[in-house]
Image (cartoon, grey):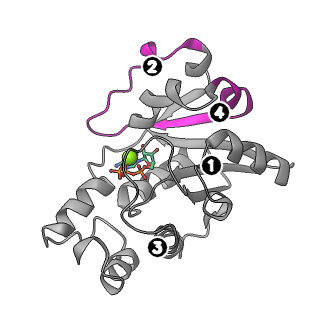
Amino acid sequence: MLVGIMGGTFDPIHTGHLIAAERARVEADLDEVWLMPANVPPHKPNAPKATAKQRWEMVVVAAEGNPFFRPLDIEIGKGGVSYSIDTIELLCANNPNTEFVYIIGADMVQYLPQWHRIDDIVRQIQFIGLARPGYELDMEKIPAHIRSRVKILPMPLIDISSTMIREEMYKGRSVRYLVPDAVHTYMEVNRLYGS
Ligand code: ATP
Ligand code: MG
């Protein structure tokens, strides 16, 4: 089985994440995509606004209805700072018959050289890189041993970020359709991001 792992802070999960996951699945012929919220993301200066439990529950409701999507609580369950190398080693040990590939947007592709123990990571898994507005996908700037492990696949440019959704909500503006309906309802019921 070939599984795409889409990690993120998901604060909140939005339509851009889901389109990216579905495009990667179709273009790379993945059997499933596992959506995996980070507990504490290593690369973000500010703590997430929603709790780990809330971010997890939003991923769960967002994945509902797509038989190819599965929420994965491995990083939230483990706690602490979520380093991809630890997760990859755990995933591979627990699923010996599954091959994993990581799905990342262009901002993360740019940032790959700075990932904790990236040389060990690229020895173990490959990446699918997807375009994202505002971030260039200039692979020439990435060292060859990393670049050779990243496959760029087609992705319509979707100019949505969790930051933008949080800002719109703090301003009291609608984010309907920028997130799935179930996430929209969840955020209102739980009074997230100033709603
Ligand atoms: P924030 O603004 O809080 O950083 P975000 O929208 O960037 O949120 P993350 O949870 O940080 O979302 O991202 C998780 C993964 O999804 C990353 O690999 C990121 O590149 C990718 N991603 C997020 N939004 C998009 C998008 N609109 N198009 C393509 N990839 C995306
Ligand atoms: Mg981000």
Q: Which residue is mark 1?
A: 4
Amino acid, disc 3: Gln
Picture coordinates of residue 144, whole percent (x, y)? 57, 13
155 left or right, relative to 160: right
Amino acid, disc 1: Gly
Q: Which residue is mark 4?
A: 126
In space, the residues marked 4 and 2 are separated at their CA atoms by 15 Å
Q: Residue at x 45, y 69 (%)?
A: 51
Q: Nearer the viewer, residue 182 or 191?
A: 191
Of marks 3 and 2, which one's residue comes earlier in the chain? Answer: 3
Q: Mark 2 vs ligand 1: CB under 8 Å?
A: no
Quarter of the image where the C terminus is located = bottom left
Q: Which residue is mark 3?
A: 54
Of marks 4 and 2, which one's residue comes earlier in the chain? Answer: 4
Picture coordinates of residue 173, whole percent (x, y)? 14, 70
Disc 3, disc 1: CB below 8 Å?
A: no
| On screen, residue 187 above or below 48 | below
Per the rendered image, the range of residues in magenta is: 119-144
Picture coordinates of residue 123, whole percent (x, y)? 72, 26
Dot in front, 3 or 4:
3
Q: Residue at x 64, y 63 (%)?
A: 72
Q: Residue at x 26, y 61 (%)?
A: 165
In space, the residues marked 3 and 2 are separated at their CA atoms by 35 Å
Amino acid, disc 4: Gln
Name the element at disc 2.
helix
149 left or right, relative to 21: right
Picture coordinates of residue 172, whole percent (x, y)? 14, 73
User: Which quarter of the picture shows residue 145?
Assistant: top right
The verdict on residue 42 being magenta is: no
